[in-house]
Image: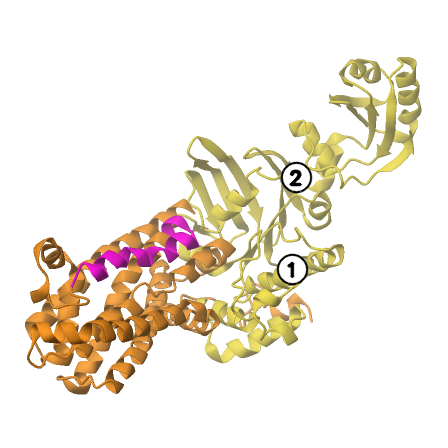
Chain colours: A orange, B yellow
Amino acid sequence: MTVADVVAPIGSSNALRAQPAGLFHDIKAIAGRALRGVPRDLEAVTPPIFISLFFFIVNVAAFQRPIQALVGGNFNYKAFQMPAAILLGVTGVSRAPALVLDIQNGYLDRLLMTPIRRFAILIGHMVADVTVAMVLTIPILTLGFILGVRFETGVVGVIAFIGLAALWSLAFAGFGYAIALKTGNPAAVNSTFLLFFPFLFLTTSNVPRSQLSGWLDTVAGFNPVTYLLEGLRSLASSGWEWGDLGKAALAIALLGTLSMSMCFAALRGRLKRG
Amino acid sequence: MSDVAIRTESLGRQFGDFTAVDKVDLEISTGEIYGFLGPNGAGKSTTVRMLCTLLAPTGGKAIVAGFDVHDKPGDVRLRIGVALQEAALDPKQTGRELLRLQGLLYGLPKSAMAKRVEELGELIDLTDALDRPIGTYSGGMKRRLDLVAALVHNPQILFLDEPTTGLDPVSRVSVWDEVRRLNTELGMTIFLTTQYLEEADELCGRVGIIDRGRIVAEGSPDDLKRSVGADVIIARVDGDAAPLVSIIQALDGIQNVEAHGNELVIATDNGSAAISPVAVALNGCNAAVRDLTLRTPTLDDVFLEMTGSHIERKDSDSKEVGR
């Protein structure tokens, strides 16, 4: 068989002809590829699961008794700690390192030479990220259920919980993509997670806001993670607290707007540089 | 499709103060194999990246398949196939996944994709390897996969950026055969960059020679070589060859003499008749001749005449007659 047997003559009527696939199909194709890459890249997703499980178990063992004694009442420290563990697991998990490899091995150029809409490349990766983040919440939630955590908001609340955690993961992933597209450097992308550390510890990750004082309370007040945690916790412990949920959604929206602006600007910059 | 597949007018690209491509004018007919020949860093790949819509020109314009690369890049992308210098592949995908994804992004119907992928796999003799990760392929297999990935959607114009760099001689000839077939049997226009003179000579109907971002010569390989002379005598001497130019130029039947370092390049209509007088003349002026070579001109001679330096030395098809 030769090329001429496979490729149709120019102008022949029975030839397969290229046409724009459409935005939805572009995104679906890229997301499908990104998701197929996850099981081949398990080293990117297994450590966050273990780290979050580890901190969940250790923090509950270390702080449950003193915090419950401090707060009193029916305070459930396991339900309180579970959202922080989940954020630890899903934050910084993205396909941005894979995008860096695409840049380095030229595959991004191959994608860019197809009629795909440019931003569909990013959105497709992000659809995959949201899916992965949802899956990553399951082990922590399962452990929480085993340890006796129950959701006041029921099954719908669990779904909302997973959705908020995944959207947070997506909002944070935007920084990883921005760094990937700006630098093309895998080490820089992998260090994105370090950005999250101050956000995670300068907040109510281990103790309730009422127990914070001085400068830490002030900083926590400016930290979007504080409001995200309060929204997530309300789903498990209090019921449908729309004020808390609204603040959580706003925190995600603000961070997401910033990170998405940065990553789409980085994409435009890379396209301009060629 | 019009008769002109690719046209550029004063096409240019600056990177800061550096001019990578400088006012390049091209007109390539539909169905032509056009070779873009030049040494590393001459501006070949930058030109290809502009024509493929990967890089925006900073000057001039380029029309590919009837569409401006700046104003209508989407229309250009539907009609071109590209195999860049480095095989642009994802090592973690399988060959089948890569070809299928290419097809999906070009909007090919899903119903036709499975058959298409099988055909393409068979074409490049990779059927058994299609379900293996591309990272396990040899260099030659990757090159072949890269080439057919550019053909999934039956492009009108195929860009090949140094398609045989790094291939063994057998694989190189195989790529040449397929390029010829694409052109002669399907009428596909092929824009090929290369630093191999032999490749340009073998494949291309016309060649543009680029150096430091500028086209320095253009024409059919035969015409370009004829412009140098019917035969070329190369004399390498110890020391500077420049003082010998006037001595050789004075001999009968010599068209042109140029000195490049310790090398004299002597163009003549009849090399067999001229080589003895040249040898005698060099001996007469006590030049220490290290070797004396008679051969037909190559594109490297054209490049040497235009730019004063070689593209590469190893490709010369020479017959050494004396030492």
Seen at 27% across and 61% down, the residue is: A172
Q: What is the span of residues highlighted in magenta in the rendered image?
A: A180-203
- The residue identified by callout 1 is B139
The span from disc 1 to disc 2 (Cα, nearest Å) is: 33 Å
Circles 1 and 2 on the same subunit: yes
Q: Secondary structure at mark 2?
A: strand
Seen at 56% across and 70% down, the residue is: B133
Chain assignment, label 2: B
Q: Is residue B261 left or right of residue B252?
A: left
**Near-viewer residue (B280 or B30):** B280
- The residue identified by callout 2 is B219
Q: Which is more foreground, mark 1 or mark 2?
A: 1
- The amino acid type, in three-letter code, at marker 2 is Gly
- Label 1, residues with CA under 10 Å away: few <14, some 14-19, many ≥20: some
Q: Is residue B99 magenta?
A: no
Decide which of tag 1 and tag 2 comes sooner along the chain.
1
Q: Position of residue A6 (x, y in %)?
A: 62, 70
- Residue A139 in sight: yes
